[in-house]
Image: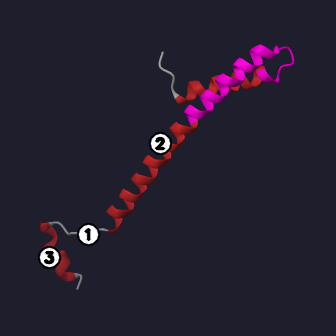
Amino acid sequence: MKNNFENKLNRLEEIVSKLEEEQTDLDASVKLFEEGIALSKEMTQKLQEVKFKVTALKKKGAALLTEPFDAPEGNADEADHAE
């Protein structure tokens, strides 16, 4: 099964819960901590990628909104009445 962001987040939450338990021994805690750090790095990288894409899309959308509007050819009479 492919790990997606939500699965990684769920696993990270499980790790945090296990680390908060006093019954987890030191060796297991270290392994869980290492796994949690690795997941955190992967998730941070994914969030940065998404942020970059959203920023690029917003810029592209803003550029589209500032381009001049060309009236369709069939509406030439309406454009003349607007003056």
Q: Nearer the viewer, residue 67 or 18?
A: 18
Residue 37, quarter of the rendered image: top right
Q: Which comes sooner in the sequence, label 2 or label 1?
A: 2
Please provide percent x and percent y for residue 3.
51, 22
Residue ranking furthest to the bottom: 83
Mark 2, secondary structure of its residue:
helix
Q: Quadrant of the image for the C terminus?
A: bottom left
Asked if residue 67 is positioned above or below residue 18 in the image, the reply reads below
Q: Which residue is mark 2?
A: 49
Please provide percent x and percent y for residue 20.
82, 24
Q: Nearer the viewer, mark 1 or mark 3?
A: 1
Q: Which residues are magenta?
A: 19-43
Q: Nearer the viewer, residue 76 or 63?
A: 63
Amino acid type at image mark 1: Phe
Q: Residue at x 60, y 28 (%)?
A: 39
Q: Which residue is mark 3?
A: 77
Q: How many marks?
A: 3
Amino acid type at image mark 3: Asp
Spatial separation of the CA atoms under disc 2 and disc 3: 48 Å
Q: Which residue is mark 1?
A: 69
Residue 27, quarter of the rendered image: top right
Residue 36, quarter of the rendered image: top right
Q: Residue at x 48, y 43 (%)?
A: 50
Is 27 included in the stretch rendered in magenta? yes
**In the visual, does 7 lie left or right of 68?**
right
